[in-house]
Amino acid sequence: MRAVVQRVTSASVTVGGEAVGTIGAGLLVFVGVGPADDPAAAAWLAGKVARLRIFPDHEGRMHRSVVDVRGDVLVVSQFTLLADTASGNRPAFTGAASPEVAEPLVEAVAVGLEALLQRPVARGRFRADMQVALVNDGPVTILLDGPRK
C-alpha cells in the first residue's frame, strides 16, 4: 500500500456535483493498493496514519497525532499512486490492484481509522470521477509506503 497524507484545514470530495465527503482540520489520506496487499497491510496503514505525529504542540513542534488533536480524516482511493513511469511518458498502472481487491482494502483502512479515532471517517467514492478540494496546512505532505513483505 502507498498513501499520501496531507495535513489540512479542510478537504472535500465531490462526485457529479454532490459532496460525498467533507472534513474540517485533520488529514486527507489518498490510498493506493497493490496486488500483494492484504488486510494486515490495511491495518498497518490505519495505525501508522493515526499515530503519525505531524500536528503542532504548544511550542509549534510536530509532536501530536490526529488522535491527539481529535482531527478529522478523509480517505480517498487513488490507484494512480502506484503508477510506473520508468519507461516512456505514459504511466502504466499494472502495479495497482484490481478494483475487486482494492475496494475492500481501502474500506478496511477507513474502518481501522474509525476504530482508532473512535469516530466516523469521511470517504471518497470508489471508482468514481472525484473532484478533491483541500487546503493543505503547513504545507505538510507525507508519503507512506506499506510494510515490507
Image: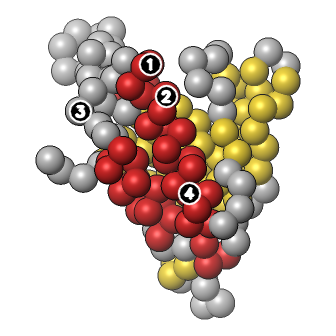
Residue 103's disc is 2
Q: Vertical placement of 29 versus 18: above or below?
A: below
Q: Which residue type does callout 2 highlight?
A: Glu
Q: Is there a contact, CB below 8 Å, between mark 4 and mark 1?
A: no
Q: Classify the position of the N terminus by image quarter.
A: top left
Q: Marks 1 and 2, how far apart in space?
A: 6 Å
State left or right for residue 27 relative to residue 25.
Answer: left
Image spot of residue 132 (x, y percent):
68, 32
Residue 99's disc is 1
Q: Which residue type does callout 1 highlight?
A: Pro
Q: Marks 4 and 2, how far apart in space?
A: 16 Å
Q: Which residue type does callout 4 highlight?
A: Leu
Q: Marks 3 and 4, how far apart in space?
A: 21 Å
State left or right for residue 75 relative to residue 72.
Answer: left
Q: Vertical placement of 64 versus 54: above or below?
A: below
Q: Which residue is mark 3?
A: 36
Number of other residues with Cα within 10 Å of mark 3, as a class: few under 14, some 14 to 19, many 20 or more = few
Foreground: 39 or 90?
39
Residue 106 visible here: yes
Q: Is there a contact, CB below 8 Å, between mark 2 and mark 3?
A: no
Residue at position x 70%, y 45% from top?
Answer: 122
Residue 113's disc is 4
- Total marks in image: 4
Image spot of residue 110 (x, y percent):
56, 47
State left or right for residue 138 relative to residue 70.
Answer: left
Q: Marks 4 and 1, how far apart in space?
A: 21 Å
Image spot of residue 46 (x, y percent):
46, 56
Q: Is there a contact, CB below 8 Å, between mark 1 and mark 2?
A: yes
